[in-house]
Amino acid sequence: MNKFFLCIFTLLLLKAELHAQFNIIPKPLEVNSTSSGSFNLTDKTPIVFKQQSLQKSASFLNGYLSRFYGFSLKQSKAAAIKGIYLSLSNKTSSNPGNYALQVKNEGVFITAETEEGIFYGIQTFIQLLDPTAKGKTMEIPFVQIRDEPRFQYRGMHLDVARHFSPVSFVKKYIDYLALHKMNYFHWHLTDDQGWRIEIKKYPKLTELGSMRKGTITGFLPGNGNTNIPHGGFYTQEEIKEVVKYATDRYITVIPEIEMPGHASAALTAYSYLGCTGGPYKVQETWGVFDDVFCAGNEQTFTFFQDVIDEVVALFPARYIHIGGDECPKTSWKKCPKCQQRMKDHQLKDEHELQSYFVQRMEKYINKKGKSIIGWDEILEGGLAPNATVMSWRGEAGGIEAAKQHHYAIMTPGNYMYFDYAPSIKRDSLTMPGTTTLQKVYSYEPIPADLPLESGKYILGAQANVWTEYMNNPSKIEYMIFPRMSALSEVVWSSKENRNWDDFQKRLKQQFERYQLWQVNYHHIPIDVPAETR
Ligand code: ACM
Ligand code: ZN
């Protein structure tokens, strides 16, 4: 071959190689780019769809384009040439969320069996856009993609009790979930350090329980106190607004109302709900506190039933998370009412009293047509009959739940706690553990030692974002990015398609997307040995 032809040949190879690199996270099931060429997206390209229900997906794309690229597209019901076509097929879905995306000369074609499938196709399309592009025209390389989620539960949690997040940031957080094809937002609304949801029948919950007088500084036990009041809560109108925002993005919001522990803020508002009667205070420090709801007092159950009535009216989710974690039994051991309850119901210890509490609330919540989720402590003293277990103290709780034919969601601390530092090189105050990006990426939600037939009880996985050491949105972003991108692949991509080296290559463009979104993220030098990242 003479030099000229060698040169042309090399260029062609290079072009093919360029086209072969699609940096989509989470990795789709199949990506094929057999023909070279590209579709030219401009501000004149229409989005064409017939079914009104696809409006949400079209609006999301337009919102993204106008926010990050400075233009939006006209929506059209009539056929047009060279458009972005969204269409629902009339097949019933085998796996809700699956979709196909094709980019060819005639346009971009996204088809799916469900609305959320179209929405996920839009998320993938967004990742075909060059994050560094300037101007109102973009070349989208020809490609054929077929994709579907691996797990039906793909979640992120946010603690708004330890530090309050305003509605504006909660919405941003929901957008981050949407951009990662996640479908559950677990909203941790009540805890010792603040009660964050307006309950009309109990106004003091937010009047008194949403505000603490100060916050410790430094790592627990702290080196001082800010002595600056910290608080905030969501009105029911705001809650509805957030739920609608999430629903428009095919994300289900699961509210968490903690019981019977983590009760200080509620007890500060209504001291008769505690075993001792107080005095109580909205906590200014972190940890686990002995001030818990009295399980012997009938008024406690009346209170929670009333709260649940209002919660159920606000959240269409089929699940209500009732907490159930870290409930010390000290007060119950000394409380005559709690001890009497144990006698009356022949409960042999305080774990069974906790189980009584949770089962009684479960019955009430089930009667409302909803199911409960609880942290894995709800296994102690006997699992409530229809409960789903969130396994956080490792995987044992999830395994035990699945063996008992209960559903489980995996959130084990070592892999899924994004309040742990992202690197052993500490550059900010965090919880003591370290969960590197690679560790998150390596997580397999179906435990190896679970009997094969029980795998179906593992609904998926979730990362938890406890905010003791995150007192502003920027810090939260730093703690979730890029680990959330790794998580999205754990819960969405097929097991066979997961590959750390390949993920790292795709991550480079994901960093460019973060820059486009102007989010704070943990930069990982790609050439640093994996263990120290
Ligand atoms: C938890 O981290 N206490 C569920
Ligand atoms: Zn009591």
Image: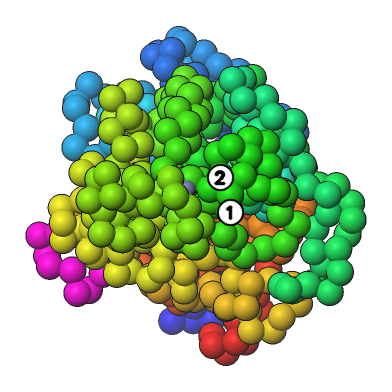
Picture colour scheme: rainbow
Image side of residue 75 versus residue 88, left or right: right
Viewer-proximal residue among 193 and 493: 193
Q: Is residue 342 magenta?
A: no
Q: Residue at x 42, y 63 (%)?
A: 392
Image side of residue 288 versus residue 361, left or right: right
Say which residue label 2 marks.
274
Is the CB–ligand 2 distance for label 2 below 8 Å? yes
Work out whether residue 153 can be spotted: no
Which disc number belongs to residue 95?
A: none
Is the CB–ligand 2 distance for label 1 below 8 Å? no
Distance CA(mark 1)–CA(mark 2): 7 Å
Viewer-proximal residue among 320 and 225: 225
Query: Badge 1: how crowded within 10 Å, few (<14), some, or many (20+)?
Result: many
Give x and y (percent) for residue 520. 73, 58
Instruction: State which quarter of the image contains the C terminus.
Output: bottom right
Measured along the vertical axis of the image, is residue 517 above or below residue 19? above
Say which residue label 1 marks.
291
Give x and y (percent) for residue 247. 48, 28
Residue at the left extreme of this rendering = 453
